[in-house]
Amino acid sequence: MNDYNEDFWNALDELVNTSEIVIDRPKGSAHPRFPDFIYRVDYGYLKNTSSMDGAGIDVWVGSGKKTVDAVMCIVDLMKRDSEIKILIGCTEEEKMEVYKTHNETQYMKGVLIRR
């Protein structure tokens, strides 16, 4: 079982290492549709990738060493979809901020899976 987990993380490493990270919502900026929502960690996507919503795979990029260290698995009841978000270089405090972000409303819930 552990070998399968390592294969997953290695595949994510390869995806991240061969993609351009685009930060379109820097830490401290407001969400474009919900101005009361302020990003507490840099947020963006991997260029030339696709996620369940058809856009690039979402990433949270922290202040640590730029390696994949966790994923958030999200269920969004308003959009009626689910997807993963890759955490890159997030400290434990930043991981908790990301976790809170995806669990602070009744419409979105997520689980944090650490590497």
Image: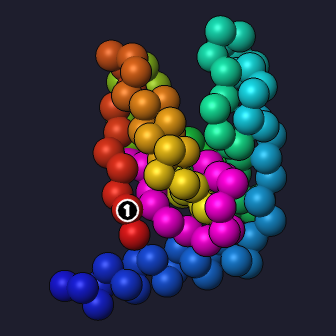
Q: Quadrant of the C terminus?
A: bottom left
State whether residue 105 is above or below residue 74. above
Q: Is residue 61 magenta?
A: yes
Magenta part of the protein: which range? 59-73
> Quick check: 55 left or right of 69?
right
The colour scheme of the drawn protein is rainbow
What type of secondary structure mainly makes up the magenta span?
strand
State whether residue 31 is above or below residue 95. above
State whether residue 36 is above or below residue 55. above
Farthest residue toward the left?
A: 1
Q: Is residue 82 visible?
A: no
Residue 110: x and y in percent read: 35, 39
Q: Is residue 27 magenta?
A: no
Q: Quadrant of the N terminus?
A: bottom left
- The three-letter code of the residue at mark 1 reads Arg
Residue 72: x and y in percent read: 42, 49
> Quick check: 63 left or right of 95?
right
Q: Residue at x 44, y 41 (%)?
A: 96
Q: Residue at x 66, y 69 (%)?
A: 65
Q: Residue at x 37, y 62 (%)?
A: 114
State whether residue 81 is above or below residue 19. above
Numbered circles on residues, count: 1
Q: Residue at x 29, y 85 (%)?
A: 4
Residue 39: x and y in percent read: 66, 29
Q: Is residue 112 visible?
A: yes
Farthest residue toward the bottom?
A: 3
Q: Quadrant of residue 90?
A: bottom right
Q: Secondary structure at mark 1?
A: strand
Mark 1 lies on residue: 114
Residue 28: x and y in percent read: 75, 27
